[in-house]
Image: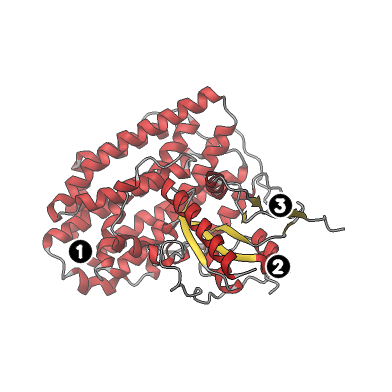
Amino acid sequence: MPVPPVVTGSRLIYFSSASENTSRFVSKLGRDAARIPLLAKDAPLLATRPFVLVVPTYGGTGGEGSVPKQVIRFLNTPQNRELLRGVIGAGNTNFGDNYCMAGDIIAAKCGVPHLYRFELMGTPEDVARVNNGLDTFWTRLSQTQK
Amino acid sequence: MTEKVKLLSHVEAINWNRIQDDKDVDVWNRLVNNFWLPEKVPLSNDVQSWNTLTPAEQQLTMRVFTGLTLLDTIQGTVGAVSLIPDALTPHEEAVYTNIAFMESVHAKSYSSIFSTLASTKEIDEAFRWSTENENLQKKAQIVMDYYQGDDPLKRKVASTLLESFLFYSGFYLPMYWSSRAKLTNTADLIRLIIRDEAVHGYYIGYKFQRGLEAVSPERRQEIKDYTFELLFELYENEVQYTHDLYDGVGLAEDVKKFLHYNANKALMNLGYEAMFPASVTDVNPAILSALSPNADENHDFFSGSGSSYVIGKAVNTEDEDWDF
């Protein structure tokens, strides 16, 4: 029996591993946000409104293994994929070509923009830029879409 | 050197089918997939480029690399090994043995660069410089003292600062040469080292945070104060070391920005907020893009004009988990 999903109307959905880096960044934004569950046995997350996804990349070589399994599972649900409007990538420039690679992969696969990149838990400047960017982004979308 | 090496007093057969912390498996797999050897990098293609450097630039490069060799040697033979008795899980112990070995690979890879580019006499001179430079020796001594101390959390702080901060006065130079299309194969090798150190700093910092969760608020505050004190002590020494190395070529100020930027990242690996403000972490964009080709602001929709944004390049993914 599959576990029934947890439904969310949050405009911001994120994944964070046990390192909590991305989770710390998201909490600094002070916006309502929903977290993709870490464990396979946890109830899956189901989005009901358009949202932006925050996803970290830690290492990896080439594209393989860059997108966390939990995020793949989340995006395999068609409804979640249809409501995805943009991606924000987290990572570390020390990973070279792979810096925020998961964001690139998801943006390309789902046809949405990679809105911003930041490192680890983000600096105060990252927090300000993302908050301003998201405000502008949602305003612009609400003017062009229903 | 008379102190006895600390070893685990009790060991059980490691069972990789019973995992307490998934991060151990993730990081082990990451490290194994990232494995490399210097013999795979065509360093000899840099010989021509090496000969375009002035004697002073060559000497600087050699000195930078002997300094990095010393840090990698410490981390391989003492640092990563000293973390084993403090491990919370048997799999964490195994990850440290992987880290220790890889640090020895890094240390050896500088010798590959040396033997490809320089004469025995130049190599010996650079190693002699490394034993005589006061600030380099001081940085090694500060870290070594903590490795030999009896506080597991402080050892992890010292180790993370080494992995994520102390290397960067050195890493700057190959990124600088690479941005000017010089020593590009050497830079490729250094990027592999940088990638490894990032995983090491991330993992040791993560384990530090797990350890911190188990102690009292007072102890947590003590460790936080200690971390910032140690960072300041190391930072002041790094600034001196940077001047020793880079004043002759006029790059010291540029290197310092890179130090600030990386000090912030070291703190974040430990779960602390960045300390240096954006006004002093504005790393030369050429250095950042030598580090990561998509690190500049033009890649961000929010930061750019937005309207000119093009959906990202197709990336080949072999993950069979995707359903679409």
Residue B201 percent coordinates (x, y):
46, 47
Say which residue label 2 marks. Answer: A76
Say which residue label 1 marks. Answer: B118
Chain of the residue that carries numbered disc 2 in the rendered image: A
Question: Quick one: label 3, few (<14), some, or many (20+) residues within 10 Å?
Answer: few
Measured in 3D between alpha carbons, the distance from the residue under mark 1 to the one under mark 2, in whole angstroms, is 54 Å
Measured in 3D between alpha carbons, the distance from the residue under mark 3 to the one under mark 1, in whole angstroms, is 53 Å
Chain of the residue that carries numbered disc 1 in the rendered image: B
Specify whether disc 2 shares its chain with disc 3: yes
Which of the marked residues, 2 or 3, is nearer the chain's N terminus? 3
Q: Is residue B189 left or right of residue B273?
A: left
Q: Is residue A14 left or right of residue A58?
A: right
Say which residue label 3 marks. Answer: A39
Q: Quadrant of the N terminus of chain B?
A: top left
- Circles 3 and 1: CB atoms closer than 8 Å: no
Element under disc 2: helix
Q: How is the image coloured?
A: secondary structure
Residue A137 percent coordinates (x, y):
53, 62
Measured in 3D between alpha carbons, the distance from the residue under mark 2 to the one under mark 3, in whole angstroms, is 16 Å
Residue B243 in sight here: yes
Using the rendered view, name the quadrant where residue B316 is placed.
bottom right
